[in-house]
Image (spheres, rainbow, N blue to C red):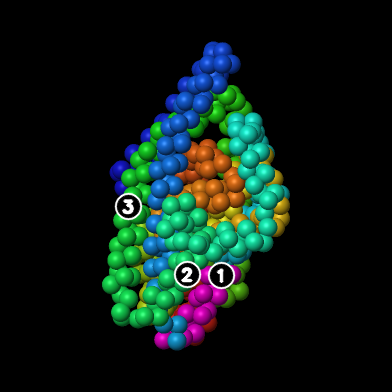
Amino acid sequence: MQPKSRLTQYILLAMLLGVVVGYLVHTNASPDFIKSFAAQIKLLGKVFIRLVQMIIAPLVFATLVVGIAKLGDLKAVGRVGGKSILWFISASLVSLSIGLILVNILKPGTFIDLAHADTDGVKDLLTKKQEFSVEKFVEHVIPRSFVEAMATNEVLQLVVFSLFFGVATTAMGETAQPVIKALDAVSHIILKMVGYVMNFAPYGVFGALAAVVAAKGLGIFQFYIIYFLYFLIGIAILWLLLLAVGYLIIGKRMAGLLRHIGTPLLIAFSTTSSEAVFPKLTEELERFGCPNKIVSFVLPLGYSFNLDGSMMYMTFASLAIAQAYSIELGLGTQITMLLVLMLTSKGIAGVPRASLVIVLATCSMFGIPPEGVALILPIDHFCDMFRSATNVVGNALATTALSKWEGELKQS
């Protein structure tokens, strides 16, 4: 707990220092020096972004294959497996859609204008988008080479390969167990690397904020206030929807469920990790009346496939960054982004800031400058507290609903 607390403090300190240094440069230096300073200090942010980018491909491959393998033989798990998948897909689409609709209505990204920071690059990206065709879409989706997709961070191509690989691995049964165990170990190693990479986050935050404030002034912070408040509106809508669905399924016992998961909720909120409460949540759901066989099946899958709060944030953050760079994305492109996030979010563990990895990959895929992720990083810790707690509610509700539908939800 202590290292994570120190990292949060360092990020907040870096944010403050970046603001102070950037403001001093903005108010006291010449335009030429400001331009040079912003370009040089921004390299710290780029280093952090590249460190994150280097782990995207192996993380997506390993976690997605292992996630598919966890489904096991659907004939053996019967109705529970099918109902779980249906719930996860529905919850994912609803969560992603809430983020997409909200960011289009409230437009939090329009409160910061960074388009002229890299005008040529944006024009080049927009030109490439205009050359879009069905043929090129197919080429973009279907990998020509797994190695090439890994090397170029083509996330959608990696997802396609991982789906085939995961299904084939599962179909081979015991023969493929060593591969599954190896990839499971790889996924944990990569997630450990995420923790190491996040240690460089304060430098990236300092560089990104110092560069932006030096060039733009303190008006930049209107974005953070509005961004966070609009995000909380999205979380509130998602909570109301989850509670309403829960009430329809288990009635007045929904209040009892919230009391049982109160401690896991508080832990997830304070540590920004829904995964940290997995053992306690398992215990409380069984105390509430969910049978062990359903809890042990649905809850682990939920941690790979049912992160409601994180998924709502993914569309919200990705489109807000696009708005910040004045990049117009049509409705068709936004729906495509939603479907891509629907796939790429699967298998990503509920660890702190894991959703930023997916946001960064998605931005790169849709021509949105990935450096924009560094801009939302200072406020991300506070967003992560709320989305981690939401992930816990979503998975608790999914497990309880499946228990109810199977007629095995006991009176606590």
Q: In the rendering, at what x and y percent does residue 118 appear?
A: 60, 33
Residue 256 in view, yes or no: no
Which residues are the magenta region? Answer: 76-90
Q: Amino acid at mark 3?
A: Lys
**Disc 3 versus disc 2: nearer the observer:** 2
Residue 402 as seen in the image, left or right of residue 139: left
Q: Which image quarter is the C terminus in? A: bottom left
Number of the front mark, 2 or 1 = 2
Q: Earlier in the sequence, mark 3 or mark 2?
A: 2
The quarter of the picture where residue 247 lies is bottom right
Q: Which residue is mark 2?
A: 163
Q: Position of residue 36 (x, y in %)?
A: 52, 21
Residue in the image at 57% along x and 37% along y = 224
Q: Which residue is mark 3?
A: 192
| Amino acid type indicated by mark 1 | Ile
In this view, the residue in front, 15 or 372, is: 372
In the figure, residue 350 lies in which quadrant?
bottom left
Vertical comparison of 280 with 41: above or below: below
Question: What's the amino acid at mark 2?
Answer: Leu
The residue wearing badge 1 is: 89
Residue at the image position 56 percent from the left and 16 percent from the top = 32
Q: Nearer the viewer, residue 318 or 179?
A: 179
Residue at left 42%, top 39%? 48
Q: Measured from the top left, where is residue 200 in percent x and y?
A: 37, 38
Q: In the rendered view, would you say 341 is above or below 224?
A: below
Circle 1 SS class: helix
Dot placed on the residue nearer the N-terminal end, 1 or 3: 1
Marks 2 and 1, how far apart at CA: 15 Å
Most frequent secondary structure within the magenta stretch = helix
Q: Earlier in the sequence, mark 2 or mark 1?
A: 1
Instruction: Return the residue nearer the eye: 229 or 62.
Output: 62
